Amino acid sequence: MKILHTSDWHIGRLLYGQKRYDEFADFFNWLTKLIEERCINALIVSGDIFDTTTPSNRAQQLYYQFLCKIAASGCSHVVITAGNHDSPTFLNAPKELLLSLNIHVVGSITDNLEDEVIVLSDSSGTPEAIVCAVPYLRDRDIRNVKPGESMEDKSTRLIQGVQKHYAEIEKIVTKKLENQDSIPVIGMGHLFTAGGKTIKDDGVRELYVGSLAHVGKEAFPSNVDYMALGHLHVSQKVGQCEHIRYSGSPIPMGFGEANQEKSVVIVNFNNPDLNDHNLDIELCAVPCFQPLARITGTMDDIIKNIDELKSKNSNAWLEIEYSGKNIAANLRQLLDKSVANTDMQILRIKNQQIVQDLISQAKNEQTLDDLNEIDVFNRLLDTCEIVKDERSMLMHSYKEIITMLNEKDINAL
Ligand SMILES: [Mn+2]
């Protein structure tokens, strides 16, 4: 049994308004080829399939075209779970149709936990693996709100909720394994595990507001041979455990990730001693389909960097941050000129000089592109002269509202 684990595709993701469908198409073509070449038996996708709960038609087309190709390939099984960016009902809508192609979709938890425990069988009906297809667990899925609870209570109960969910899944798996030859058990999850790495500007959205404590790896079923995680965009193993991994996103989500190597994970379970998690695990680097470059510095630094890229015939998308002391009023014209007649494109210019001036004056004329929703709310708190004690509660409630809006399944009904 050989599986390929990937997650956090975020199909439809924009970069400063720039559409990236070509990159997604290139990725899917590459992945299709890899799956064929490496004779993968099962494709495991751990959430954040789409970037938003209402993906564009083009994003949907890319997804279904890819699934169609995989269904026709030698890869007999696909298991897809929803992440915090996905609409559970959107992913579930074609569930039965996809199941006829051996593509299992778990968009949300149901009343029946058995729905998350999927037995993959070969063409003769013999089970070859068990997949615990646990999707992103929403706050309301796992926690009963109690009146008067503190933020710590809430945090503790969230973690307990996740632990309980996996503990129950573990019981179901144990039962299924009873009258069964040893077969690999693959766990899934879309969550932030304690000790996980993120980097600034990687597009990872906060899951449970105010919950500083993250779920420990002990929460995962002990009978799982490999844990295929999603949510964190940096490829990593969890707590030194080779068999508990985040595949990371295949495409950089922001300029902060410009130099990150992206990969997917191939796991070969054909090793005899499954109990020691003695697996062959291989990271396959995803080619860079659209180079990104972040250039920061004085005018001279920036031009020098651009010239260097030019000499390599680069087609990079650029984010340029001017941090020189002198006011560079004609920055845009100078930079546009420097990339004229090249395949490079400037997606964003940040002029620290102007920003500094504005911040020290009236903070106006800054575009919303430079601020996130938290910055905007902080400014409101400043303007209203809210005292420190009240700020954290207000910020907490505000973040809860933002999460609710982000996760609202607007097309559910
Ligand atoms: Mn994600």
Image (cartoon, rainbow, N blue to C red):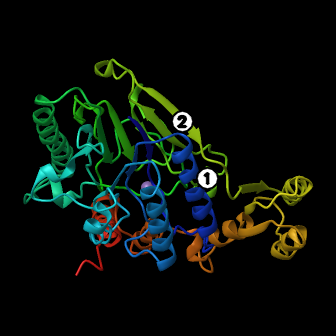
Provide residue 252's location: percent of width, then percent of height.
Answer: 59, 54
| Residue, far front | 124
Helix, strand or loop under label 2 = strand
Disc 1 marks which residue?
A: 256
- Of circles 2 and 1, the one toward us is 2
Residue 239 seen: no
Please name the amino acid that badge 1 sits on: Gly
Residue sitting at x 84%, y 69%: 335
On screen, 376 above or below 118? Answer: below
177 left or right of 363? left
- How far apart, in angstroms, are the residues tagged by discs 2 and 1? 22 Å
User: Viewed as shown, does residue 325 lie left or right of 12?
Assistant: right
Q: Secondary structure at mark 1?
A: helix
Q: Quadrant of the N terminus?
A: top left
Task: Name the quadrant where ligand 1 sits.
Answer: bottom left
User: Mark 2 sits on what residue?
Assistant: 283
**Residue nearest the observer in this picture, 351 or 382:** 351
Instruction: Where is residue 376? Give x, y as percent.
Output: 46, 71
Residue in the foreground of this view, choosing between 211 and 164:
164
For residue 117, above or below residue 326: above
Task: Using the image as rendered, state which of residue 289 and residue 409 is in the foreground.
Answer: 289
The image quadrant of residue 351 is bottom right
Kind of residue indicated by mark 2: Leu
**x%, y% of residue 397?**
27, 65
Task: Give the answer, above or below, for where 311 lies relative to 276.
Answer: below
* Residue drawn at point x = 44 percent, y = 51 percent: 7
Q: Which mark is residue 30?
A: none
- Tag 1: Cα neighbours inside 10 Å, few (<14), some, or many (≥20)? some
Tell me which corner region of the image, top left, top right, bottom left or bottom right, holds residue 209. Answer: bottom left
